[in-house]
Amino acid sequence: MKTLKFILSAVLLILPASVLFNACQDKTFEEVTYTANVPVYMGFDEFRASVKRSDPRQMEQPGKIYFKDNYLFINEISKGVHVVDNSDPANPVISTFLEIPGNYDIAIKGNILYADSFIDLVAIDISDPMNPVEIDRVEDAFPNVLPVFDYTYPVYGLDWEKGIVVGWETKEVTELVEKGNTYRNETLYFDNMGVPTLGSNEVAIASSGTGLAGSMARFTLNNNFLYAVHNSSLKVFSINPTPGITMNPEILLDRQVETIFPYNNHLFLGTTTGMMVYSLSNPAAPAFVSVFEHINSCDPVVIEGNYAYVTLRSGTQCNGFTNQLDVVDISSLAHPFLVKSYPMFNPHGLGIDNHILFICDGDAGLKVYDATDPMNIHLNQLAHFPDIRTYDVIPYNGLLMLIGSGGLYQYNYSDLNNLVLISHIPVYVP
């Protein structure tokens, strides 16, 4: 608004009165008051000095999960990571909390935890999980990231030079606009598919030396490289050595990408319109192999043997309107094809271990199937836990680690005829 007034003042000083008179007849301006999302900023210096350890705290809004060396790392959406000592899954203990503003994703190799922090990638030495130390940072690794906001209202006053946008205030603003412009300043509106928001989640099994991630993961590791999906691109970071992380040229994709799953020296990318396959023959520059197309929907993916299992769901910013499980034959990675689809309620993350398929079906709870016969999965349901709102899972050696809106749940599935809940860390409810 100030800029516009300045321009109008300059015009008044320069243009002849007759020209001004005619121009004002063509265009007049008025003040319009409306409700908008107004950015809340954190200064760059404060932001880049804010990673630290703090006392353990209760979970309030848990996100993605990661498992390594008997520890569970649970994202607290946009705030950091709970470190949980899970050496006794029947009695998990939240040991400490890593404050990482703007964090949604993590991956761990050796003793180094890699995490997004709004626009930056940070590397934290967790040799002693009780005394983590930031050892490296790639600034602007994920440019122009914004926290999630209420799409009902436009964004007002966004200025990338002011600092990191760490939140929003919903309040009334007044703007000078051309009279009759019912859309106000159209540049303040963001297409749901184009907003560079953080967050999205599903499950993946990482390579040797790393941990296990959930299917909603957007980070994964392979040898000396970290791969991160961000909007419509695949980012590649060389992490050998750390410190000393470098960025390789990013790979531009022709669609919005949501999740990433590594398997057999390939990356499987869950996008809003299909599953893409990239080869890691040259890990520094993943090469496109194929794509399995589907209608618009968010889709995490997990793989076992010659089959990929993909969940599609509605009610997301991916413009999806279907809820189903797709089984895709990937025996020929160059030519994946659909084997069968199964209706679901609202599936999110999923995991598979020795043909046992675990599906987080949203408000419909956790569903467990024997997927030995991909053509008859629906006839082989082993268990259903309908009373939890599920989000993502990691199955490992008879232990199922599940995150949902109610907190962390762990099940013993060593006896498939008797899956038993062995522990639960609830979320804090004020």
Image: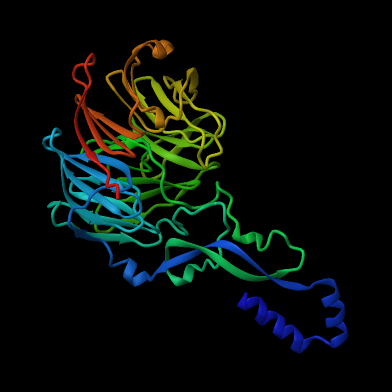
Q: Position of residue 213 (x, y in %)?
A: 29, 38
Q: Is residue 364 left or right of residue 426?
A: right
**Which of the pair 325/337 is nearer the observer?**
325
Residue 383 seen in the current view: yes
Q: How is the image coloured?
A: rainbow
Count of numbered badges drawn on the protein? 0
Residue drawn where x is 47% and y is 59% of the image: 144
Residue drawn where x is 45% and y is 57% of the image: 145
Q: In the rendered image of this protein, does residue 45 appear above or below residue 101?
A: below
Q: In terms of image quadrants, where is residue 396?
A: top left
Q: Position of residue 259 (x, y in %)?
A: 41, 39
**Which of the pair 129/84 is nearer the observer?**
84
Q: Position of residue 164 (x, y in %)?
A: 41, 65
Q: In terms of image quadrants, where is residue 18?
A: bottom right
Question: Image quadrant for the N terminus?
Answer: bottom right
**Which of the pair 194/135 is nearer the observer?**
194
Residue drawn where x is 55% and y is 29% of the image: 294
Question: Residue farthest to the front?
Answer: 430
Q: In the rendered image of this protein, does residue 46 appear above or below residue 296?
A: below
Residue 210 seen in the current view: no
Q: Is residue 92 left or right of residue 314?
A: left
Q: In the rendered image of this protein, does residue 40 appear above or below residue 255?
A: below
Q: Is residue 369 left or right of residue 165?
A: left
Q: Position of residue 113 (x, y in %)?
A: 24, 50
Question: Residue farthest to the bottom?
Answer: 13
Residue drawn where x is 70% and y is 85% of the image: 9
Q: In terms of image quadrants, where is residue 385?
A: top left
